[in-house]
Structure formats: structure tokens, C-alpha cells
Image (cartoon, rainbow, N blue to C red):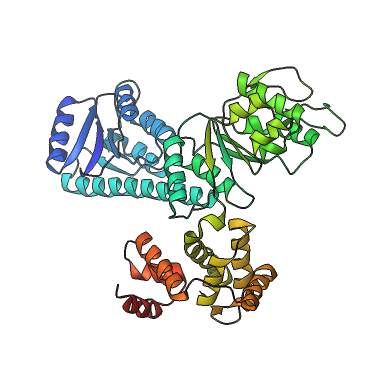
Amino acid sequence: MGNNSAGRVLLVDDELNALKVLSAILKEEGYEVFQAQDVAGAQKVLGLNEIETVITDLKMPGQDGMHLFEYISVRHPDVPVVFLTAYGSVDSAVSAITQGAFYYFIKPPDYKKLKSILSRAVEQHRLKKEVEALKSKLEIGQKTERIIGKTPGMLRIFETINAVKDSVSSVLICGETGTGKEAIARSLHYQSTRRDKPFIAVNCAAMPGGLLESELFGYEKGAFTGASTRRIGRFEESADGTIFLDEIGELEMALQAKLLRVLQEKEIERLGSNRKIRVNFRLICSTNRDLSREIKSGNFREDLYYRVHVVRINLPPLRERKDDIPLLTSAFLREYCVRENKALEIASDVMELFQLYHWPGNIRQLKNVIERAAVLAKGSIITARELSDEVRQFALGRAVTGSVVKPLRELEEAAIRSALLECRGNKSRVAEMLGISRKSLYKRLSEMEV
């Protein structure tokens, strides 16, 4: 709903003339006015429209204004309620104020003051809605990482995520360890209509089959030695949400058969019980294995493969998306600068080295290297001294063999141009993203003639 009108107001009064007069006054002020002559009618209007404030008479035949106030307090707690009352029921109105009503007026009201109070009530409602929206965005931001990338392969992945995020079809995310498969899964969930439902992640490689089975399906008290209470499994916990099976290629064959049955029948049985429980979830899986090869080797069921492999997302290793490295590096550096309360920049030769290194651990390794460097850095510049042994040894090897490297100026210009594109030309944001001072950025832009 847009905020084009002064506000959407519901007037509730059993006197038709009173409704007409107040409605005409408020419409002249730009309000969109809804009317009801009893509590039942008001409840119907509230159910069908996004009302921003209710102005209600206190005394009405049948259910009165207090009944309506109690209903709104439970069902629409963000909607302010203003009472209109006769002299004889002032005590009731004061009581309502102590319970959370916004204001009360004695009939006939001072219309100038009523308009002022109404404006405040609508503003309060809108501020509450904005705060709720910001909280929701913050909660989602805390649960999912921002996926960074401008290379063609990553842009295609973003398009796929947008196309399938609201589908119920299973998604298989393939890629080497550390490429960010769980981040993609979380993005699929938190951009979807299921975002308010659970996202349950299970690492299939982290526990043996028997333990993983009880983790997924749950168990009843006494199902096995040590089962002293009933335990709800991950499938049940993911009700109406998403379950993410990380490294599904690690599942034992017996558990693969049980998973296939769950996907076919949408039912589970807790260990120690024969009662079937209906489950509803969206399945996302990941693997760093070639499942087609695993099928040929007899390690993965072909029928399960086709169940989990409806939509496939292939995440490229970091060595194949090196143009994204400056952006990823800058994002990670900002994160750790905030955490460590430091202001750091990456030395130009280090950034050059990052784009030459092969990154066997992919994004996870890059993030780890940046974290280590940010913690160890004593000055304002991260140099090769702060890098991990693997990266530093690679740098020494390049120096010894005299390998041909990409010109440093070309690497810097590529990073700056990429950041300018992402920040839409906002130079302050570009400097922040690249971890350099604005003075340094303006100097390089001048040299680039940008």
C-alpha cells in the first residue's frame, strides 16, 4: 500500500448522520474513509483493508466500542484506536486509554483537535510499519550472506535464483568446497515466499548414518538406548519452509532410500513409531561430488538423483571468477575492519597476488585469509607479511621463477571500474568498497581519466 492519501481511516458509529458529517470533514483533509455502523461491520472492513486508524463510538447497540478495541488489540495491534464518547461514559474512555487506546473525545468533538490527533495516530501507525519492515530486513540480513559477483557466470546464477525462488521444485547446488553453496541455498529461501518459515540446514557429511537418521526423522522416547525423551526431526522442524541437505552425496544408501520415500509420499515416521506424519517442505541439496559418476559407481541412487535434481545450479570455483575477487576482498575487509575496529587497506601487490593465486579453498579460503590479515595487521596497510603460509609461499614461488604477471595498473583499473559499476558512480562508496581513501581513489581516477 502506498501512502498517497493522508491516511486510511475507519469510522464506526451507529448514528448514520454522525458518520456522514465526520466522513465529509476527513475526506476534505485527504483521508480515505471507511464506514461501519456496528462492531461486526468494522471487523469485516478491517479484514479486507489496511486501516491505519480507527475512530469509534463507545456506546453502540449490541457489542460496544470496548469490544471492538479488544478485538483490534489482539488482531490488529498496530492500528491506533480513537474513541468518541458521551459525557456519561468518560470513565470507560479513560480506562481504555490506560489499556492502550490512542485518544478519546467527548461528543461533539473539537474537529480541529481531532484532525491533529488523527494525523499523529496515522503517523504512529506508519512508523511502526516501517520499523517492522526494517526489523524484517535486518533479521533476513543476519541469516543470509550477501552474494557478491559481477562475472557472467554469477549473473546467470542470480537470474536462476530469481526464476525459481518461489517454486516448490527441488534444487541441487553443485560446486567445490568453499564456493558458497549454503549462501545460495539461504538466498533461495530468504528471497522466497517461505522467508518467514524455517530454514533448516543439515550437514550430511558431519555425522554417521545412524545419528543422521535420528536427526532427520526424530525419534520417540525409548526408541533406542539413550532416547529418554521424544525428539522432533529436521523434516518436521522445516514445516512449510526449506530443508537444506548439505553434501547429499555423503548419504549412505539405506538413508537415500528413506529420503526417496519421504520425497515421494511427503510422510515420515519417527524412529520407534509406526505413525505417519505429513510433512511439507522445499528441498534444496548441495554436493561437491559428481553424482552422475557416483551413480555409475553404485554409490548414489539414480531415482533419488532425479528427485533432487529438478533445478541445478553450478557454482564456479573462485579461480574461474577472478574478476570478482576485488569485490569479495573489499566486502570481507569491511566486515573485519568493523569487527576489529580498524581502518585497513589492501596493498596493491597483495590484490595482484590474490588474482593470480589459484584458491583451492575458494571463497571460504579467501575470507579466512582476509580475517587473518585483518587481525594481524599492525599498520593501516595489509601486506604479504599478514597473509597465510599457503598464499605467501605462492608469492615467493612466483618471485623465484620470475613468472609473467598481469600489470598491476591493469588490475587496479579493473577493480575500480567494477566497483564504480556496482556503486553506480558513487565515489565515496567505491572508496569504502575497495578499502582505500577517497584521496587515493580520486588520484587513480584522474590517472585513468575517468
Whole-percent x and y of residue 86? 25, 35
Quadrant of the image containing the C terminus: bottom left
Whole-percent x and y of residue 373? 61, 72
Quadrant of residue 269 within the rendered picture: top right
Residue name at image x 62 percent, y 66 percent:
369
Residue name at image x 36 percent, y 80 percent:
443
Quadrant of residue 85 within the rendered picture: top left
Whole-percent x and y of residue 157? 47, 44
- Left or right: residue 1 compared with residue 417: left
For the image, the number of numbered tags is 0
Whole-percent x and y of residue 391? 64, 69
- Left or right: residue 130 compared with residue 262: left
Does the rendering let one see residue 305?
yes
Q: Residue furthest bottom?
A: 379
- Left or right: residue 161 compared with residue 301: left
Along the line of sight, which residue is nearer the eye, 307 or 123? 307
Quadrant of the image containing the N terminus: top left
Residue name at image x 61 percent, y 20 percent:
264
Along the line of sight, which residue is nearer the eye, 19 or 279? 279
Along the line of sight, which residue is nearer the eye, 199 or 297? 297
Tell me: residue 306, above or below residue 348. Answer: above
Does the rendering let one see residue 219?
no
Residue name at image x 40 percent, y 71 percent:
413
Tell me: residue 369, above or below residue 123. Answer: below
Q: Residue furthest right?
A: 225
